[in-house]
Image: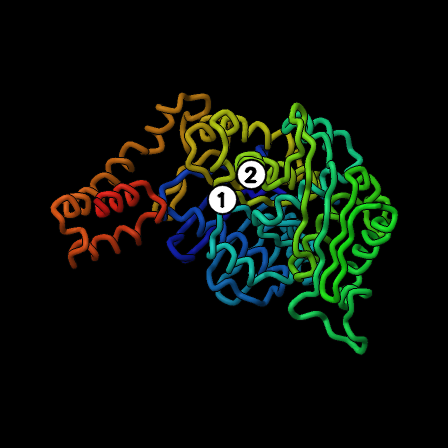
Amino acid sequence: MRITHLSIQNYKNLKDFNWTIDAGYSIALIVGKNASGKSNLMEAILHIFACVQRDVMQHTHFDYSIEYEIETPNKHKVRLESQGVKFSAWRDDEKVKDQQAQVALLPSKIFAYYAGTSKRIEDTFRLYKNPPAFEYYTPTKYKFVLFALLASPLDKIKKDFLQKEFGIEGLHDFSFKIQKPHQAIESTNTPTRDNFWNAPPDVLTLFEGFKALSSKSQKEKVFTTEKLALKFDGEVINQILDFPFLSDESDLFEKMIKALELGYIRDLTLNIKKTGVNENIIFENFSEGEKQRLAIRGIIELYEGDETLYLLDEPDAFAHPRWQWEFIPDLERALGTYSQVIYVTHSPLVLSSAKNNAFFMDSGEIYPAQETYGQSANVTLNKMEAQEILQATEDDFATYIGLIEEGKGESPEGVKLREELEEKYPLNHPKFDRADMLISY
């Protein structure tokens, strides 16, 4: 699935937004200042697809026209339009009126990733929690991706990706903590640990499979009326996809995530064997850059071949400069011909590695980035207007820092200026650290 054109009218600061993308290239890269409209664009795309999937009569509260190509089962050009309360869908210039046929034109999956946490993105996804095609990718889910990848029988995943890129040889052991949810699904039968507190059928069969595997292990088991902890030897993971109710590693991932979101899985612990490391490493001790790269590449490996749209907001935020430079080529190799990534970044290294579909965004408008591929970081920074941004930041904080140096940082004028700065800049901005240190002195 590849978006080729998108028009949006009156969604937040996207007043008269028009964007054309080359469908021959799998990644569209966007660079822009804070509050330029990048996150608004991500949200608008999600609203469009989610409203069509849930109910074509549910209006998005803004007008749009989106055009894209789909490959499976056959190649088609799709256009979805909404004006006022009127919605229409087209396939190869032929109008599609049946709602089920309209839904069949949508991408099979939409994944959104945001570096850190974003209440805005979470709230947007919460609106569309029921459709299984929409997944907001939080750090809690990273190790579930790794678990599913390790369960895969494919050498392409285990050797070429996990071992070659991260030195991950396998698991020494792993454990599940399963619990009774706060609101266990009630039925005529009293929820108990034996029926996994009336878990839905697909979650129930998953847990029963793990419990059967645990009966063959001599590892520790902990039971209470509301908790069940199962510990396994690492090689047991190779038997999981033998469960008859699992089709592949992506199916395993989806069922585990469903159990997690319903409150049945409290935790998953992975003790990992790495090349050249004597002691086992728990997943939480991986660097943030490793977790981030595993999360992004891993989910693409799981859904290779699907018509998937990935909305990635700063997936390089914790990456080493070399990894930032390699991020785009790495994604190109992994994506294949069926999926598309819309990638937001502030990294000049990432921008300089994009051969095509690189864009600048400002004040709700988008335009192509010219001659950025292969440029040095300094040249790219200038094109990103970083110098002006840095100077603007200095100017914004200069008055406040001056007040603090005069001993007036906590005066009414200083407090008001601080509130204005906190509205404009993230609270972890280093300028705030300097200001707080000066105040403490």
Q: Amino acid at mark 2?
A: Gln
Q: Is residue 71 visible?
A: no
Q: Are marks 2 and 1 in contact (CB under 8 Å)?
A: yes
Residue in view at x 22 percent, y 47 percent: 439
Q: Residues within 10 Å of mark 2 (few under 14, many from 20)?
A: many
Of callouts 2 and 1, which one flags the residue occurring earlier in the amino acid sequence? 1
Across and down, in percent, residue 151 comes to 76, 40
Across and down, in percent, residue 57 comes to 59, 67
Which residue carries the number 1 mark? 115
Within the image, what quadrant is residue 308 found in? top right
Instruction: Report the residue that reaches farthest toward the left.
Output: 406
Within the image, what quadrant is residue 372 found in? top left
Residue in view at x 56 percent, y 61 percent: 126
Residue 257 vs 340, above or below: the answer is: below
Which residue carries the number 2 mark? 292
Disc 2 from disc 1: Cα separation: 8 Å
Q: Secondary structure at mark 2?
A: helix
**In this view of the protein, which residue sits in the foreground, 300 or 82?**
300
Q: Amino acid at mark 1?
A: Ala
* Quadrant location of the C terminus in the rendered image: top left
Residue in view at x 68 percent, y 53 percent: 257
354 sits left or right of 282 in the view: left
Across and down, in percent, residue 399 comes to 16, 45
